[in-house]
Image (cartoon, rainbow, N blue to C red):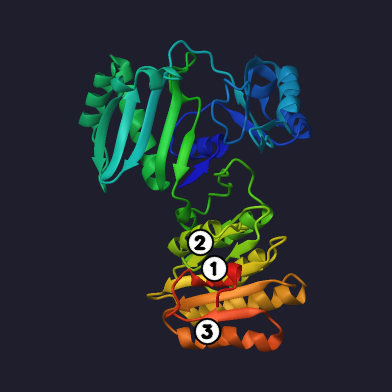
Amino acid sequence: MAKVLEGPGMYLFNKWGIYTPRHVVVSTTDQIESLVQSNQWMRECKMVVKAHEAIGSRFKLGLVKIDLDINQAIETVEGFLGREIDGVVISQVIIAEMMPHQEEYYLAVTSTRDGAEILMAKFGGIDVEANWDKVSKTFVRIGDKPNDEQLVKCSEEAGFEDKLIEKMRKFSHRLFECYSNEDGLYMEINPLIVNPQDGKLCALDAVVLLDGDARFRHSDWNFSFAPEFGRSYTQAEEQIMEIDSRVKGSVKLIEIPGGKVAMLPAGGGASVFYSDAVIAMGSTIANYAEYSGDPPEWAVEALTDKVCSLPGIEHIIVGGAIANFTDVKATFTGIISGFRRAKEEGKLDKVKIWVRRGGPNEAAGLESMRMLVDEGFDIHVYDRYTPLTDIVKYALKGEN
């Protein structure tokens, strides 16, 4: 699951015919002058300025300012940028056209085990949570699309009347098309309003969760996903995410500053097992990482290089269960190349490497790892007959 910030979310909405306010995203106040020259609406309209970060309850935190002229907008942007909220430093701000309105509505599409659910309410904003039992819902099976009859019924049950029923029907179709074609997991518009100038429904906000692993299918996803853990992504994390988006299989990396044991396991399950074992034995992990699905050697090499570059590490765990189809020798070739490069750059001084693996071509792969001893590596290699997490015990307790 990958969260998309409001600006890219509105881009996806616009792509599928969903009306949003005109807006720009800035990371410095210097950008505003040129944007004002090229966007007439910024000279003529009142504006809304919001922190463009994955921060909840922005309005309550004072991170949304409304009814601003251009000078007030610039002053607000200056006040937002660089401000730290709960460990998140505001690096971007969204400036949007302000749209006065009378009523606020709610519309969302969310994935379920058997398909998707469309949700509607004739109230939006914070009122939705307080009145969740009044939200109208309709179900769409996997592979199907909502039909007009069910959307009309859902709109009526939500309390919409007259022309708004037809407007909600059409708008819901568009949101579902966006959700379906963009590999969506959740899309929410809150608030949804009627623009008094033209009578059109307009999405004032965009909450979008996508299947991040589907990026390879979308050449226009030229935006970064929002961080999932209260800080911006590091350069190394972003580089691995970019590689992961264009290769068969998967490579993942999350850095955890201050840890002593670096992780380079095969598969998410093994990553969790090894991480738990390290913590249970009183040590600390320097990262989360995994490679799976038989990724190419160069991708595994790149991941290995980032893992070896983690500061202050004392051990590297290269572990995994018995693979079904991942070629152990091939992936180990990528890891070994990464180890060699790291050693040449002085990154592995006093670092011990612990290996445990099984699967296709395991004998050749494990032997190639053992041969690194002759190149001066402090490496310890075990086969499938060693219990999965015993290498952690060997590393931390010296019980070998």
How many marks overall? 3
Spatial separation of the CA atoms under disc 1 and disc 2: 7 Å
Task: Categorize mark 1 by other alpha carbons within 10 Å: few (<14), some (14-19), many (20+).
Answer: many
> Hey, what amino acid is under mark 1?
Val
Secondary structure at badge 1 equals helix
Where residue 60 sits, quadrant-wise, is top right
Q: Which residue is mark 2?
A: 277
Residue 151 image position (x, y, % from top left): 26, 29
> Hey, what amino acid is under mark 2?
Ala
Spatial separation of the CA atoms under disc 3 and disc 1: 18 Å
Spatial separation of the CA atoms under disc 2 and disc 3: 22 Å
Residue 194 image position (x, y, % from top left): 44, 17
Secondary structure at badge 3 equals helix
Q: Is residue 377 something one can see in this rendering?
A: yes
Tag 3 or tag 2, which sits nearer the N-term? Answer: 2
Number of the front mark, 3 or 1: 1
Residue 31 image position (x, y, % from top left): 75, 34
| In front of the other: 369 or 236 | 369
Picture residue at 39% right of the left edge, 47% below the top: 181
Task: Categorize mark 2 by other alpha carbons within 10 Å: few (<14), some (14-19), many (20+).
Answer: some
Number of the front mark, 2 or 3: 2
Q: Is residue 187 left or right of residue 290?
A: left
Q: Which residue is mark 3?
A: 366
Secondary structure at badge 2 equals helix
Q: Which mark is residue 129?
A: none
Q: Which residue is mark 1?
A: 392
Tag 1 or tag 3, which sits nearer the N-term? Answer: 3
Q: Is residue 252 something one can see in this rendering?
A: no
The vertical placement of 334 against 200, above or below, is below
- Tell me whether the residue at label 1 lies in contact with that at label 2, contact meaning CB atoms closer than 8 angstroms: yes
> Hey, what amino acid is under mark 3?
Leu
